[in-house]
Image (cartoon, rainbow, N blue to C red):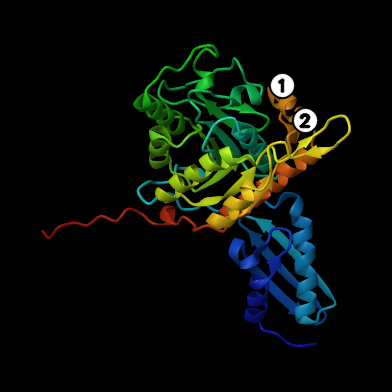
């Protein structure tokens, strides 16, 4: 058996390409400890994202490769999770207590952005993360209905800040909690951005690993202003396969890059219609739109979701697919996408601002 130093083993482990997530261990985690003694090897691994269902596959692969590299006959690997904070736009500071703010955005309405946002949030929560949802679509808030919270109102204990509502384990805030559902929001841009700023900064979120922001559709002044005022650590672009949707999604992607927000990738909603009677799949909205974006912008395809009538029924009833039918193919697709989103976020630049105090420069006396 070859005798290897701890440094050699660590370097090897960091280089392993994890098949379950398509990233090297060193890019999304670190090795805390290794030990090779006789015919036994062990390691403690820390991941910067909630691995969920993938953790067993990750553990098994590392154990196999550790045995092969060290010549050990038995390997025991422990996998821990510590979700990291990641950097936001250079001119903004992260919100205290919130490690990552991920915007779910689209260039146009009608692509199922809110449905994707709520199911991804629920999937992240089910994997062990502390998750909140900010419904930033002031003109058309959907999250109160989707999370079964319609008619509820937030409580303010001090008259200045609000406690978020809780639905299915998520902390939730929306303008829909503060106005009558039938009341149209006839507001101009400055009022909308002011309202969103209050929902973000006057809500007592507590400690969150992820705050999922359901962004309003479009790429106009409101979206640009929100992108400059909300400290976002990553954005996911939602599109459907047809060209008319990807044309607008491409503009949205370019807008986020212009304001220096990392684009984690794209998800394709309504990829194919699945017949509820016979199970036949048909690409009624065409195909290839998201693939073209992935190729042109060199970003990952994070997930593809089917067009199934049950998804609409479940979200309308206040119990989205991830909870209502966890064994379905659609729920698995949302969980897989949530994992890929968390992995993509974990590979971004970490935020170290909280590690350093304020630097004060004093003049000569």
Mark yes or no: residue 188 visible: yes
For the view shown, which residue lies furthest in the right direction?
278
Badge number at residue 317:
1
| Picture coordinates of residue 154, whole percent (x, y) | 53, 21
| Picture coordinates of residue 180, whole percent (x, y) | 52, 12
| Picture coordinates of residue 280, whole percent (x, y) | 84, 37
Report, in whole angstroms, how far the alpha carbon at label 1 lies from the one at label 2. Answer: 10 Å
- Disc 2 crowd rating (10 Å Cα; few below 14, some 14-19, many 20+) is some
Among the two numbered marks 1 and 2 on one chain, the one whose residue lies closer to the N terminus: 1
Observer-nearest of 230 and 81: 230
Give the residue at x 76% y 88%: 2
- Disc 1 crowd rating (10 Å Cα; few below 14, some 14-19, many 20+) is some
User: Would you name the residue on which mark 2 appears?
Assistant: 324
Give the residue at x 45% y 17%: 185
Check whether the beta carbons of the residues at disc 1 and disc 2 lie within 8 A of each other: yes
For the view shown, which residue lies furthest in the left direction?
365
Q: Identify the secondary structure beneath mark 2.
A: helix
Classify 241 as above or below 179: below
Classify 50 as above or below 185: below
Classify 184 as above or below 299: above
Q: Identify the secondary structure beneath mark 1.
A: loop
Give the residue at x 54% y 24%: 141
């Amino acid at each position: 058996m070859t005798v290897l130093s701890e440094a050699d083993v660590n370097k090897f482990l960091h280089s392993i390409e994890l098949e379950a997530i398509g990233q090297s261990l060193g890019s999304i985690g670190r090795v805390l400890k290794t030990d090779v003694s006789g015919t036994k090897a062990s390691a403690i691994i820390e991941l910067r994202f909630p691995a969920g269902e993938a953790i067993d596959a990750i553990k098994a692969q590392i154990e196999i490769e550790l045995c092969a590299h060290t010549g050990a006959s038995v390997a025991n690997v422990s996998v821990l999770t510590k979700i990291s904070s990641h950097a936001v736009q250079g001119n903004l500071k992260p919100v205290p207590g919130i490690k990552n703010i991920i915007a779910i955005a689209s260039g146009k309405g009608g692509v199922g952005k809110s449905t994707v946002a709520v199911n991804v949030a629920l999937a992240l929560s089910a994997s062990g993360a502390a998750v909140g949802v900010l419904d930033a679509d002031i003109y058309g808030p959907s999250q109160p209905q989707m999370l079964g919270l319609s008619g509820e109102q937030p409580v303010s204990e001090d008259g200045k800040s609000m406690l978020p509502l809780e639905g299915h384990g998520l902390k939730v805030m929306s303008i829909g909690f503060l106005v009558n559902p039938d009341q149209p929001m006839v507001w101009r841009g400055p009022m909308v951005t002011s309202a969103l700023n209050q929902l973000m900064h006057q809500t007592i979120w507590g400690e969150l690993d992820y705050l999922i922001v359901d962004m309003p559709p479009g790429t106009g002044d409101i979206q640009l202003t929100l992108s400059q005022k909300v400290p976002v650590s990553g954005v996911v672009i939602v599109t459907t396969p047809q060209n008319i949707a990807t044309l607008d999604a491409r503009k949205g992607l370019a807008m986020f890059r212009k304001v220096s927000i990392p684009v984690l990738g794209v998800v394709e909603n309504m990829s194919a219609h699945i017949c509820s009677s016979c199970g036949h799949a048909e690409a009624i909205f065409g195909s290839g739109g998201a693939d073209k974006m992935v190729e042109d912008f060199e970003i990952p395809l994070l997930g593809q979701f089917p067009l199934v009538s049950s998804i609409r029924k479940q979200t309308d009833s206040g119990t989205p697919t991830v909870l209502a039918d966890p064994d379905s193919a659609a729920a698995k697709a949302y969980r897989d996408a949530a994992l890929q989103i968390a992995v993509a976020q974990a590979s971004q630049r970490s935020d170290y601002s909280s590690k350093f105090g304020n630097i004060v420069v004093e003049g000569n006396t």
